[in-house]
Image (cartoon, coloured by chain):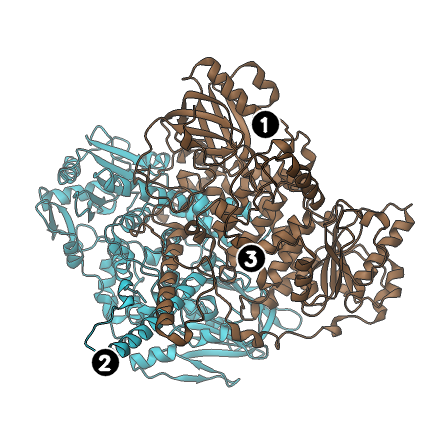
Chain colours: A brown, B cyan
Amino acid sequence: MICSGFFVTSGEVEFCSANPILKYTQDDLSQRGVFGTLFCTNFRVTFISDEKPQEKTDKTFKNKLYGENDIPLMCVDHIYGVYDEKRKLITGGLVKNKYPSKMIIHCKDLRVFQFSLTFSKEEDAKKIFQGIAHHCLEEKSLKCVFAFSYMGTPSPEMQWKQETVMFDSPEDWTQEMKRTKANCRLVTENENFELSQRLPKYFVIPLTIGDLFSYQGKGLPIWCWSHYSGCALFKASFPPVTQEDGDFQKHLDTMINAVAHNHLYSVKTEDLSESLPNIQDIQQSYNKFKQFFLIENSTDFWLSDVKWFSSLESSGWLDIIRQCLQKAVEVVECLEKDNTNVLITEEEGTDLCCVISSLAQIMLDPYYRTLMGFQSLVQKEWVAGCHAFLDRCNHLHQKDKEYHSPVFLLFLECVWQLVHQHSPAFQFSETYLTVLSDSVHVPVFSTFLFNSSHHRESVMKAESPLAQSGPLSCPTVWDWSVQFDSKAQNFFFNPLYLEKVKHDRAVRKPHKPKHQRNLSLPSTAFKTPPKKGFFKDETDSLKKMLRVKRLSRWRGSPDAPAATTREFFESWQHRPLDYHGLLLPCLDGPAVHIWMQRYLRWIPEVYILGGGSVAVMTKLMELLSQVQDLKRVLEQRDSSQAAKLDHRPYFQHRLLSFDSSGRLSSSFPFAYTCYRSFKPIIPTGLMQSLMVTDSLASQEDEASSVVSFV
Amino acid sequence: MEESGSVDSVESLCSSTTTRSDRSSGPRVSDTELRSKAKAVEKVYKDPSKDELPLLPEELVQDSAKDVTYICPFIGPVRGSLTVTNYRLFFRCTDREPVFGLDLPLGGLSRVEKIGAASSRGDVSYGVVCKDMRNLRFVHKEPEDSLKKSVFEVLMKFAFPVSNNMSLFAFEYKQVFPENGWKVYDPLAEYKRQGLPNESWRISKVNDHYELCDSYPATLFVPVTITDEELRRVSSFRAKGRIPVLSWIHPESQAAVVRASQTMVGQNGRRCKEDEKLLQAIMDANAQSHKLFIFDARPSVNAAANKMKGGGFESEDAYQNAELVFLDIHNIHVMRESLRKLKDVVYPNIEESHWLSNLESTHWLEHIKLILAGALRIADKVESGKTSVVVHCSDGWDRTPQLTSLALIMLDSHYRTIRGFQILLEKEWLSFGHRFQQRVGHGDKNHTDADRSPIFLQFIDCVWQMTRQFPAAFEFNEYFLITILDHLYSCLFGTFLCNSEQQRLKEEVPKRTVSLWSFVNSQLEEFVNPLYVHYPSHVLFPTVGIRHLQLWVSYYIRWNPRMRPQEPVHQRYKELLAKRAELQKRVEELQREAANRMASSSSERAGSPTRSITPVQTFV
């Protein structure tokens, strides 16, 4: 029986349990562990130790929904069974026969759990193993996802709602257009999804498009963001055109034409499916990459350490991140330098289009680098923008692998690179990004559960009358109070963030260049034969129709764009860095890093006790809170300023109860080292180094004994 | 970088090869300020192109030429004027915006050569290979007058003064600084800080005149139970007479770090009972443990191969209670080759698509990992095992100081301060005879010398890795480490000249040259890490997994303008400190005002809200 205190989450139902189960402690080579009970519920797999919980240090950063021994069902990535020393991946077939002596669970947040099933009664062990395998691996229907049983009380404050723009109403879009001074048209015709079920409920298109209803809205350029110069970024689903389909080609021409009309008759189109890896490539690369972090024991760790860089390279993951950022920089260059409208396209228009358009907006618009701005951006481009979260994250364990791909994670990875390179420009911290990447696999939030706006609406509508208890109470992920108390939410804020000083607004605009008309070539440029360059050339008819600005260099060899963005980056780099202006990433090899916090946080071998960036961040946070306390004191003193109190909700009471000795582990706030004695981690297997040593190694240090050496 | 901030480099002495835009660790004290501090008269050389080249005291212009083209690998050919003094090479182009300049000390040059024959227009190409990870290329017209020497011939002469029977610029440079850096290290004071001598360890005068071992310091600490006569016998059994002596002692457990060279066991398995007695005495000096760990830095194969040449390692039969551990660190030749490969990978251009595998193929970080792992094992045995350790390699002057000094940094927070680090270098590297002259090849044109090796650079890289992992544990910043490396080559200061303490005394280096520490300690604020917190008792155990090791981009790739290093953390921290100070001041003012008002109106005392804010010590 589960004791009453066990349910942290209401609506949770136990499926099965077994006792005693041994959970191995990960950081111990001697294969010791803790005995306890393993449960499987409709929400999670959880292990409850038989031992009385030790007096743990008060965790400042505790997830209210699941603890360190809980694995939300959606978070389970793979299950391995150890049968007679052999490790096998568990799939449907294996479950029926025999249960393994040891069960290894790899989680999507990269935790690794190892349980020994040999100590409990055979039928219990079999039951729990089959139960876990069934609920975590078998295909299931959306209705079985815990979110539909979850009965959490909605946050009373609804603080998130005040500032995160959800983009689920016409007002939100109008407001956004106003903010960016866009001159486009809001479409409300799809309110009941009559136009298309793949399109958002509300969206914005260029002014000149008249006919909405042809081709089910396919190819409709959807507005993303407008540059202050007037040019804008659009995205569209753009299926590859077959030659026979002349009408459709015409339709697309009209669409491109409409985008061009938005500003100065200019347009660059970019087919992302042609120039970026597809979602299967992304999936494969990530699968390889994540293996390097799912470490089961020390020996594995040190073995993989030897070939670390080349394995990393062979996964290609960092390269995909680089390519996406590179592409976003190209888009930014068009908007910022050439003041050209940009239309990015791909088959569905909801995968890489989301990645590239969101990244470009973060680079260009400082608003999206604030926490609320970033959340609004995810709402705008991803949630309202119909990214197929359900399929891509494979929440329902569908066997068809074609649709799975960590596209959203890829986006967060790219954002992390930007945060890492220019942290003073971002209000949110890497911890925030890590938590957000974990939250995708917490089956409580409506945010990541659906494939489109239409899907969300239809499910939610259908669900409400069935649930007797009233409307479906799925919180959005932005209601952070569901997972963290306000103290823990402090970690979402980057203490390095340089807040914008209000009065320097006037300074920013004057030095921006005017439209660089001088760059556009005279009409003779059209005479050069259309070559398939980087940004595709439009149809000749279009060129004649519009005096399209084009730059001859786009037609160069495939390497040319990299060279020009290189130039663009360098000229940006030469200007003084403005954290509230345009932000570009450096993409050279040594500048692209691994998101250490996310990937290394559960590996004890790499914990740095008393070190890591945590040591700096906690010091900064401390100092920041002192500065704020002093400010408050001054405000209280100065009655004339009393009215202007600090508005920001989270920033108050920032003083954190840190271990003041400065001995936190580098994996803080995710893992704590209270179990570990303070001992260094000595690498094993150094002799297995694959270093190829030639004759040099056997030479003497003294040159006198060396015959000659050139 | 080279381009944008190059104008600044002209006016600066500190790290004459890096420029202001590289660093955000604070505004640099310009040379002008420095000179005014030092009250030295300075000459200004009027360049034909009317650009003033500020010269150091005793620095003389030897030659200059106009119309020299520098082939910059990043921005293409640049035309300008080239000036060679007895200290530096100076190239400047004023035609472009921003003004482009190169300013590098001749000590940093390892090779200057003519490339190919003159072209049809009489242009000759010159290649300059530098010790600091870059190659420069110039194109210049041969002088029509064949009797006149080309500026590059002058350059070759002054770049390698030792090969041309001239003295290094350090012996001419006569800057006076407020502090005398030669006084930083006093061996007796340093050992006294460690609580020495004590009942177990004594000072031995046996090497007072460098008779026992010419590469060791005069002051040696040995167990009290060993006589000087026995030490003499030991010295004949240890390579180059480098006997086991104390380097550091744990303040609580009395576990000691002892350094030495290899034993001369040879193929016949020679033994030396005095050496065995000495190691037993070292073990006995520490009551906490009945074991002694001997760390041989070499791979076991190499250690065994040394027996063929008379060397070898301690056998466990002869040394009971001692456990021998090999640390698998490779020799100077492997390290030199590794750095050469690294240079190929990072300069001038980085191949993006294979960056990681290229980096791996240099093995540079793998070597760093092995050295750090070795030092970590030593520190662990001393700290956690409370056991004394003996560390040696072959001669005990390359891998041994790398290991002992890194272990000492982990164990003793004093060595993580700016002055403590200077003491550590003076003690473990300079006094114990790391062969700086040979390894760096100061002023020597023989660039293929197999004795050259980046051992010290590798050590500084390991220290940098530790500063990355423990950003608040070191008093010094990255710029301090880069400055040390720049002046390792510059030959401006006497600190890194010669091969041993004995040689430095013979050459009167402390009398005739200026110490790098005179310069550094006269402007400490430049080198301070604002995040530093002093925790005296903290032992640092770094993580040596390659996942946590990084290539030191701001050193190895600093010439690439795209790799602009950023240290926003330091900047932000300093800003916050300033802001806090400002606010604190305002609060205090208001309080004083309020208190005055209170005092005048009533005698009641106002509670002060600021009392709750504990003033945190600032280190800026």
Q: On the picture, is A365 further left or further right than B311?
A: right
**Alpha-carbon span between mark 3 and mark 1:** 38 Å
Label 1 belongs to which residue? A137
Q: Which of B259 and B68 is in front in this view?
A: B259
Residue at x-position 30% and y-position 52%:
A660
Query: Which element is circle 2 on?
Result: helix
**Vertically, is B308 above or below B248?**
above
- Subunit that carries the residue with mark 2: B
Query: Which element is circle 3 on?
Result: helix
Q: What residue type is labelled 2?
A: Ser
Q: Which of A190 and A131 is in front in this view?
A: A190
User: Same chain for the residues at labels 3 and 1, yes or no?
Assistant: yes
- Subunit that carries the residue with mark 1: A
**Vertically, is B31 above or below B379?**
below
**Vertically, is A93 above or below A471?**
above
Label 2 belongs to which residue? B601
Spot occupied by residue B393 in the image (x, y as percentages of width and height): 30, 43
User: Same chain for the residues at labels 3 and 2, yes or no?
Assistant: no
Residue A162: which disc?
3
Query: Which element is circle 1 on?
Result: helix
Tell whether label 2 touches label 3 (CB within 8 Å): no
